[in-house]
């Protein structure tokens, strides 16, 4: 579980992750603050930077990767991802559809 | 000779037991992420139901959220330094970095509480509208998790002080680290779903 041979257990690696996370946070905040882009584009940038930042955190801080992380942990993560997709996606699909039908 | 084998057997049994706990804790985190996912889904559905009350744009402050984000993100880095110090077997540095993490975490919870109390004082409490009920449920659940994490840090600091970096203490510190880093991931989703689109 606590893999000893990954290269994400160094100060430099943690600082890289921190720098990347900081950059991926500043971009959407700056765009919302300045209002440079249209609302639609800004929302798209927020979603993309958030998804990348989640991956940065998983890799640099939780040390999740495809080589050293045990298969059952990855399986649990993937299963949780599928459940989240089904439940959140399903909820939004039904409720937005309902909203549309009620208009 | 037999004693040696016995202790060896005991310590490997302990290692297996701790490994199982690590996996169990990972499963817990995954189920916890489902709780948050449903709170997010509820918030997304209720977002526009302000019942003629204050809306997200009037309530949220971008700089306040940026401050909270900075505190929590930095606390994730300092917890990482505590984990590194643990791998190098330096208990005093573990305690130092855990203490820094705890202070940053308390700063985060403090900022959140001042935001909540300001909103409630302005008549935008959880009972005002569906939007605010969903907001307080989602962000409050996260804040509660961070508060429990702070309690966990206090307990772990005490363990390191009293017992030193024994195998069970290392294992607990590792799991607490998973919990802390996981909460920062949830926060990314919170500022991306709640605060940024709310201010936009």
Image (spheres, coloured by chain):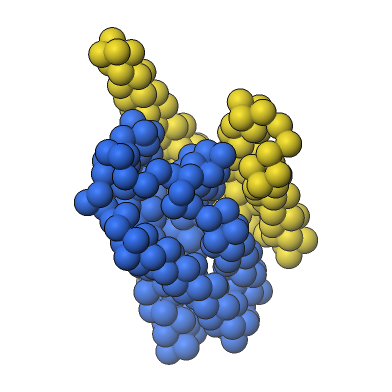
Chain colours: A yellow, B blue
Residue B13 visible at all: no
Q: Residue at x 71, y 32 (%)?
A: A37
- Outermost residue, top side: A101
Q: Quadrant of residue B37?
A: top left
Above-or-below relation of A6 to B158: above
> In this view of the protein, which residue sits in the foreground, B162 or B95?
B95
Q: Quadrant of residue B109?
A: bottom left
A41 sits to left or right of A79: right
Q: Residue at x 46, y 81 (%)?
A: B157
Above-or-below relation of A11 to A32: below
A67 sits to left or right of B135: right
> In this view of the protein, which residue sits in the foreground, A92 or A54?
A92
- Outermost residue, left side: B127
Residue A24 x %, y %: 69, 45
Q: Quadrant of residue B33?
A: top left
Residue B176 x %, y %: 45, 64
Residue B129 x %, y %: 26, 44
A102 sits to left or right of B6: left
Residue B90 x %, y %: 62, 81
Q: Residue at x 61, y 26 (%)?
A: A40
Residue B183 visible at all: yes
Q: Residue at x 62, y 82 (%)?
A: B93
- Outermost residue, bottom side: B162
In the picture, the quarter occupied by the C terminus of chain A is top left
């Amino acid at each position: 579980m606590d893999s000893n041979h990954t290269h994400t257990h160094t100060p430099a690696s943690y600082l890289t992750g921190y720098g990347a996370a900081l950059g991926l946070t500043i971009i959407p905040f700056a765009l919302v603050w300045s209002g440079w882009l249209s609302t639609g584009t800004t929302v798209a940038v927020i979603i993309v930077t958030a998804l990348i930042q989640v991956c940065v955190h998983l890799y640099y801080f939780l040390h999740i990767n495809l080589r050293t992380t045990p298969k059952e942990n990855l399986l649990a993560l993937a299963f949780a991802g599928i459940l989240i997709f089904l439940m959140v996606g399903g909820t939004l699909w039904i409720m937005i559809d309902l909203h549309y039908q009620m208009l | 000779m037999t004693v040696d084998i016995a202790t060896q057997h005991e310590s490997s049994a302990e290692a297996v037991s701790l490994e199982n706990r690590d996996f169990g804790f990972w499963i817990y985190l995954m189920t916890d992420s489902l709780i948050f996912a449903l709170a997010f889904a509820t918030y997304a559905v209720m977002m526009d139901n302000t019942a003629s009350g204050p809306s997200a744009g009037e309530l949220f402050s971008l700089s306040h959220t940026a401050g909270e984000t900075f505190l929590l993100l930095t606390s994730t880095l300092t917890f990482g330094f505590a984990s590194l110090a643990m791998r190098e077997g330096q208990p005093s540095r573990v305690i130092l970095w855990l203490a820094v993490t705890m202070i940053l975490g308390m700063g985060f919870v403090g900022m959140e509480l001042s935001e909540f109390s300001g909103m409630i004082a302005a008549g935008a409490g959880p009972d005002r509208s569906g939007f605010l009920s969903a907001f307080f449920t989602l962000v409050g659940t996260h804040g509660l998790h961070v508060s429990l994490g702070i309690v966990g840090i206090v307990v772990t600091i005490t363990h390191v002080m009293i017992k030193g970096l024994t195998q069970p203490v290392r294992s607990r510190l590792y799991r607490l680290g998973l919990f802390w880093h996981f909460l920062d991931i949830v926060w990314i989703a919170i500022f991306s779903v709640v605060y940024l689109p709310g201010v936009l």
